[in-house]
């Protein structure tokens, strides 16, 4: 498996949103990030099997320190999700960020924050994250805490 930096079109095409309007807004947001340091990564294992966005928003701080955030997380299998998390953590450490938050789908109005923990049998709502039920367990196993 390997991680590659990519463009917004490939990133969104890896796992496009269910709503066409959301895809339009997401493409526009990812293409116009002048005020943030944004990196879009895809995971390849023969074909594209995952993605993650890593970003540093200068307005987002915790305890007075700049925070590294990740979002638009997608993987087909738990081991692929763990690989993406490890790679994004390494990226932030090399950028001098010791505090990492996520998943935070920036801009959050289009994709929400966090992971869906229950309600998988309910109709999908705009603005909420969508993910398989096992995402939460993988995040916890990688040392992430649910804090809200």
Image (cartoon, rainbow, N blue to C red):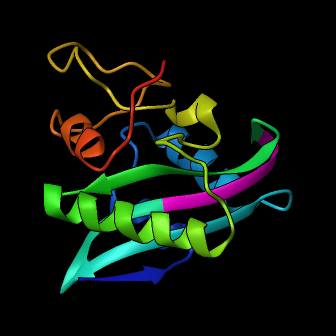
Q: Can residue 77 be seen in this view?
A: no
Q: In this view, does 8 lie to the left or right of 76?
A: right
Question: Percent position (x, y) of residue 70?
Answer: 52, 52
Residue at figure coordinates x 39%, y 52% from the top left: 73
Quarter that holds the N terminus: bottom left
Question: Over which residues does the magenta segment extend?
Answer: 53-60
Considering the whole magenta stretch, tell me its main secondary structure.
strand
Residue at figure coordinates x 18%, y 87% from the top left: 46
Along the line of sight, the residue nearer the viewer: 58 or 18: 58
Question: Percent position (x, y) of residue 51?
Answer: 38, 64
Q: In this view, does 36 lie to the left or right of 141?
A: right
Residue 19 highlighted magenta (yes or no): no
Residue 145 vs 86, above or below: the answer is above
Residue 83 vs 26, above or below: the answer is below
The part of the image, by quadrant, that contains residue 2 is bottom left
Question: Percent position (x, y) of residue 32?
Answer: 77, 59
Number of numbered callouts drawn: 0
């Amino acid at each position: 498996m390997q991680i590659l930096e990519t463009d917004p079109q490939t990133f969104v095409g890896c796992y496009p949103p269910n709503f066409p309007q959301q895809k339009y807004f997401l493409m526009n947001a990812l293409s116009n990030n002048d005020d943030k340091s944004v990196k879009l990564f895809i995971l390849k294992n023969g074909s594209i099997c995952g993605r993650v966005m890593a970003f540093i928003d200068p307005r987002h701080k915790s305890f007075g320190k700049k925070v590294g955030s990740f979002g638009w997380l997608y993987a087909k299998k738990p081991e692929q999700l763990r690989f993406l998390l490890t790679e994004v953590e390494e990226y932030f450490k090399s950028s001098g960020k010791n505090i990492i938050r996520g998943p935070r789908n920036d801009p959050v109005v289009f994709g929400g924050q966090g992971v869906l923990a229950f309600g998988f049998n309910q109709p999908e709502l705009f603005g909420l994250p969508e993910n398989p039920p096992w995402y939460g367990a993988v995040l916890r196993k990688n040392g992430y805490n649910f804090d809200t």
